[in-house]
Amino acid sequence: MRVTIDRAGRIVVPRQFRDRLDLVAGTELEIEALDDGLKLRRIGSEPTLRKKKGFLVHHGAASSAIDVVEFIRAERETRSRDLS
């Protein structure tokens, strides 16, 4: 796939790659110069829970210290208040 560098030196990572690699705004990448191109690699840790289509979804293998039962109860209370 081809991309073009704009006047500011930026490139756009195509959506199919962003979705596949779960690259979202604010994701930090490390860039490395190779003999024949560039290599991008994600650095740092990302939150394991992210909202997708209104639902929290776990991404990655890292475990979370969240109390799932308490979280669900609090979400239900919040939604009940919002509907009232």
Image (cartoon, grey):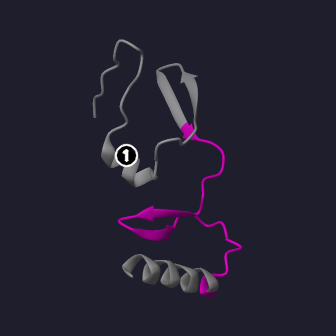
Callout 1 amino acid: Phe
Q: Nearer the viewer, residue 77 or 20?
A: 77
Name of the residue lying farthest toward the right: 65
In the image, residue 36 above or below residue 24: above
Magenta run includes residue 31? no
- Residue that numbered label 1 is attached to: 17
Q: Which residues are magenta?
A: 41-69
Q: Is residue 22 left or right of residue 53?
A: right
Q: Nearer the viewer, residue 82 or 4?
A: 82
In the image, residue 27 above or below residue 10: below
Quarter of the image for residue 53 reads bottom left
Q: Residue at x 45, y 53 (%)?
A: 22
Q: Residue at x 38, y 52 (%)?
A: 19
In the image, residue 72 above or below residue 30: below
Quadrant containing the C terminus in the rendered view = bottom left
Give coordinates of residue 29: x percent, y percent: 56, 36
Q: Nearer the viewer, residue 9 or 79?
A: 79
Quarter of the image for residue 68 reads bottom right
Magenta run includes residue 52? yes
Check disc 1 and report its element: helix, strand or loop: helix
Q: Residue at x 66, y 66 (%)?
A: 62
